[in-house]
Image (tube, rainbow, N blue to C red):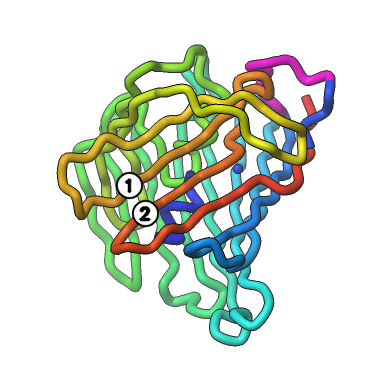
């Protein structure tokens, strides 16, 4: 659950809508069933057309004793006219380095090479426009347009999933950037036990993800934007 949530992020006041940044640091507070769990720090850097996107989650308060390590996700790739095009995704835990999971995307061969705990395998099902767990949420900021019906193939460190999202008005959310009108992308599911994912983005702030929610097995995990710094 944490891996998927960490997928799915203070703008300068002069940043125009849909302007893709060259650098940004975003801090989210992480909640479980309404109780503060920790903090997520996402960092994006771009040089020429190459990007690096990282996300690090750490527990805080009493939970730090139960979860002393951190989870770090890293997406690297290129920025194209269609948005982010990941080339590699890494999922690491500081308290379990042997569980490092890596997915390398070969766009020429339409395949993915996985490695995890000493094992390696390949999947020949990579589709055009695929994103990894981390880049999928930030793709909203780089895509040339916002789709009404968003279908995306998502690459994790060990598997591959197809998701479909429907866009709806998200209402006004109070954020560190002020009250923002949002759009909401909600995963379309037919199985009542399937993982439910909802992402709220702010079009007036370059489609910045300001709130992310994942519901699974009766547990609700949320990321809420608390601090942000973006440079054009």
**Residue at 30% across, 27% down:** 151
- Graded by Cα atoms within 10 Å as few (under 14), some (14 to 19) or many (20 or more), the crowding at tag 2 reads some
Magenta span includes 15: yes
The N terminus lies in which quarter of the figure?
bottom left
Q: How far apart are marks 1 and 2 (CA)?
A: 5 Å
- Disc 1 marks which residue? 196
Location of residue 152 (image quadrant): top left
Q: Give the range drawn in magenta.
A: 14-21
Q: How many labels does the image show?
A: 2
Asked if residue 38 is positioned above or below residue 114 in the image, the reply reads: below
Pick the front one: 182 or 25: 182
- Disc 2 marks which residue? 215
Mark before the other along the chain sequence, 1 or 2: 1
Location of residue 41 (image quadrant): bottom right
- Graded by Cα atoms within 10 Å as few (under 14), some (14 to 19) or many (20 or more), the crowding at tag 1 reads some
Magenta span includes 228: no
């Amino acid at each position: 659950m944490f891996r998927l949530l960490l997928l799915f992020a203070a703008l300068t006041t002069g940043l125009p809508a849909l302007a893709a940044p060259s650098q940004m640091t975003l801090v989210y507070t992480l909640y479980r069933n309404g109780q503060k769990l920790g903090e997520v720090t996402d960092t994006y850097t771009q040089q020429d057309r190459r990007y690096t996107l990282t996300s690090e989650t750490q527990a805080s308060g009493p939970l730090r004793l139960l979860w002393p390590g951190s989870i770090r996700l890293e997406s690297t790739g290129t920025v194209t006219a269609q948005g982010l095009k990941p080339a590699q995704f890494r999922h690491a835990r500081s308290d379990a380095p042997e569980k490092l999971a890596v997915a390398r995307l070969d766009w020429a061969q339409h395949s993915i090479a996985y490695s995890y705990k000493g094992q390696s395998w390949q999947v020949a099902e990579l589709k055009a426009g695929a994103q990894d767990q981390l880049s999928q949420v930030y793709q909203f900021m780089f895509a040339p347009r916002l789709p009404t019906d968003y279908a995306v193939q998502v690459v994790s460190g060990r598997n591959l999933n197809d998701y479909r999202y429907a866009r709806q008005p998200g209402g006004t959310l109070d954020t560190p950037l002020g009250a923002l009108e949002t759009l909401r992308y909600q995963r379309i599911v037919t199985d009542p036990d399937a993982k439910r994912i909802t992402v709220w983005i702010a079009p007036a702030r370059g489609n910045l993800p300001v709130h992310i929610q994942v519901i699974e097995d009766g547990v609700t995990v949320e990321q809420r934007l608390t601090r942000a710094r973006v440079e054009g």
